[in-house]
Amino acid sequence: MKTGKKELRKYIAELKTLHATSATQLSDEIMARLEAHPQFQQARTVLMYHSLADEVNTHDFIRKWYASKRILLPVVKGEWLELYTYNGPDRMKIGAYGIEEPTEGKFTDLMQIDLAVIPGVAFDRRGNRLGRGKGYYDRLLPFLATTYKLGICFPYQLLENIPTEPFDIRMDEVLC
């Protein structure tokens, strides 16, 4: 297998095409494991992501839990991700990259985030993450040093080795 980041992104894109028919069932199973996870059960404030079509689907999960936990979603602002509180599907708009984003409720007290559920193109068993290459999470994660970071992906996105850079931050765990 090729080992450069660009080649790994292309390889995973090809795998996603092969597994597209099982994505809904796999998403449901992964989200059920997240729901039962002790870190999620104990968390009061959870950073999630509003999934794209090729990611583990988080939409129903977010709608289910936002009334009992503070759910935060990232909003792209220039080169940075700002965090906003999810307050229901009627308070979302299409933002950068076609991702639905909250329209209000900016959240700045990052020390209150108990759990960060982080997407990725791929992960390895040591918690290394391969993103889409724009660096948004690379710039956010250093501010979440005390937050439990849980990478989330489909099983075929868990690889043996992800190439890393000095600035890369490992996940505490990968759930797939």
Image (spheres, rainbow, N blue to C red):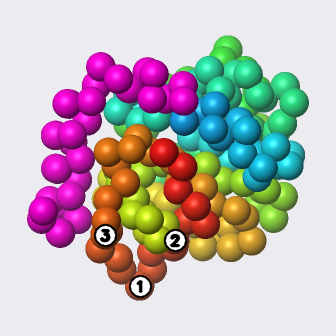
- For the residue labelled by badge 3, is the local secondary structure a helix, a strand or a loop? loop
Which residue is found at the position 78% from the left and 29% from the top? 66
Q: Magenta segment, principal secondary structure?
A: helix
Dot 1 and dot 2 residues touching (CB under 8 Å): no
**Which residue is the site of mark 2?**
170
Image quadrant in which you'd find residue 154: top left
Name the spot of residue 46 as percent of width and height, x first.
74, 46
Which residue is found at the position 68% from the left and 73% from the top? 145
Vertical relation: 154 (above or below) 86: below
Q: Badge 1 local density, few (<14 within 10 Å), some, or many (20+)?
A: few
Q: Which residues are magenta?
A: 1-29
Name the spot of residue 117 as percent of width and height, x first.
61, 49
3D distance between C-alphas at marks 3 and 2: 12 Å
Q: Is residue 121 left or right of residue 75?
A: left
Between disc 3 and disc 1, the foreground one is 3
Residue 170 vs residue 51, the one in the foreground: 170
- For the residue labelled by badge 1, is the local secondary structure a helix, a strand or a loop? loop
Precedes in sequence: disc 3 or disc 2: 3
Q: Which mark is residue 161?
A: 3
Dot 3 and dot 1 residues touching (CB under 8 Å): no
3D distance between C-alphas at marks 3 and 1: 15 Å
